[in-house]
Image (cartoon, coloured by chain):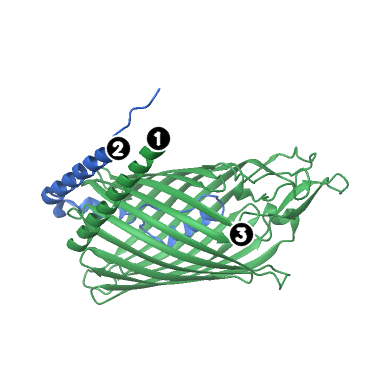
Amino acid sequence: MVQRVAQEAAVAVTRFSLLGCGMALTWLMQSHAAVLPQERADAMYHSYSGGGVSIDGPSILLRKQIGNSVSVSANYYVDTISGASIDVLATASPYAEKRTEHTVGLDYVRNKTLMNVSYTSSDENDFNATTYSLGVSQDFFGDLTTLSLGYSKGSDEVGKRGDESFSEQAERHNYRLGLTQVISKNFIVGLSLENIADQGYLNNPYRAVRFLEPESERGFRYETEAYPNTRTSNAAALTANYYLPYRASIYAEARLFSDTWGIEADTYKVGYIHTFGDDWIVELRARHYSQSKADFYQDLYQRSEEFNFRARDKEMSTFSNLSLGFSVSYELRFSASAWLKKSSINLDFDHVAFDYQDFRNVLADAPVGDEPFYAFSANITRLYLSVFY
Amino acid sequence: MQLRTFPCKSVGRMLLFAALALLNIACASIEPWVQPYERDNLADPIMATNRNPVATSYTHHAYQAREGARGAEGGAGGGCGCN
């Protein structure tokens, strides 16, 4: 009977949802008006340095409006990777690599509806990925509420250096729902939900698990990881921005995550943005992230191929990190009638400390399985010039 | 002990009609409680969830590559109907 009640409740909820969606769509059709993103150009130098790895490169973003209802954008982004993380040091040699990413997008506004489509391609010598995205957002209830829906489809082609015959594929579908609500003239909140479903080869071909092998020199050996070939995840984030009585604001964000691999994660972020005169904007922020391990993660297996699925990728382990960061922006304003309206130079910096709770540092001199847990810190820097026209 | 059968179907319908009625009332009578001329603060760039898209997308990428969680980053987007 409980089952029947549940079924009937589900039917009622489904009908309600369908009608609710119908009404929402009617509002979407009736109401009017969104705004195209601001025309701007950004040139950024980015750098990540930590855990033995350095990644840096440029990113250029251009956005231009065509007529009153269309805006186009293009982004060129490069990662130059050098050094060796602990995973690489344990199983392979340091390497240098380059990743290039191109994105083109188009936004179209009609009354209160904003639509966008974009295409991204990312190329490395052993990994190619393409993503198609589309989204629609709509303001309603006197422009106090914005509802947005999005979908992306990604395809990966995974190769492996030194193994020409290695070729695997993976596919990804992202479904996004966002709701932004103006609460008062100083307070705005947002809710966003995202479901991501992957299918295909989801391993990193260079990562390996270790298992006990008493006869080997170090007491353990490595073998290839084996992940399930499907993964579905759900994430929900709640954000709030509040304008203070002087020209400053505070914000907070909480995100919950879970997936079918058994990973559960929480992210909390708070920030304070302060202005000095009309020209300077300073932001201070803190972010904390923690996650539980994937069901099939283990730092040390008892024997080769102990389980069907095996992982020792530290991103699959139990860990947390804390980031502390700041941003400084200096703005130059020009005449409203000039071609160039505003320009800004910006520096963003974050220091992140990672603490692993079941990923051991195999480089430490200790008995197998008793090595200290790994920890490292990294600096993330972004220096960029923006012009608004 | 036998559980009493809960008239879920009728309650479901009643809830549905009540919700639709409320939504219709809300739709017909809702007045924006923040007027367009009161949105200066909301339109200030310091209130934007994605003030600098080029830096924001890079930052998300930097975290996503090193964490198991993914998705629902950077707020819901959308704005306050200002500009």
Q: Are marks 3 and 2 on the same chain?
A: no
Q: Of the residues shown, which amino acid type is indicated by label 1?
A: Val
Q: Is label 3 in contact with label 1 (beta carbons under 8 Å)?
A: no
Q: Which residue is mark 1?
A: A2
Chain B's colour is: blue
Asked whether residue A243 appears in the rendered view, the answer is yes
Q: Is residue A67 left or right of residue A317?
A: left
How crowded is the residue under tag 1: few (<14 C-alpha within 10 Å), some, or many (20+)?
few
Residue A377 numbered tag: none
x%, y% of residue A134? Answer: 38, 66
How crowded is the residue under tag 2: few (<14 C-alpha within 10 Å), some, or many (20+)?
some
Q: Nearer the viewer, residue A103 or A25?
A: A25
Q: Secondary structure at mark 2?
A: helix
Q: Which chain is green?
A: A
Q: Quadrant of residue A225?
A: bottom right
How crowded is the residue under tag 3: few (<14 C-alpha within 10 Å), some, or many (20+)?
some
x%, y% of residue B42? Answer: 24, 52
Q: Nearer the viewer, residue A380 or A309?
A: A309
C-alpha gap between disc 2 and disc 1:
11 Å
Quadrant for the N terminus of chain A in the image: top left
Q: Quadrant of residue B54?
A: bottom left
Label 3 or label 1, whichever comes before in sequence order = 1
Q: Which residue is mark 3?
A: A54
Q: Of the residues shown, which amino acid type is indicated by label 2?
A: Cys
Q: Which residue is mark 2?
A: B8
Quadrant for the C terminus of chain A in the image: bottom left
Q: Is residue A187 above or below residue A134?
A: above
Q: Residue at x 33, y 41 (%)?
A: A9
x%, y% of residue B65? Answer: 55, 56
Q: Nearer the viewer, residue A255 or B25?
A: B25
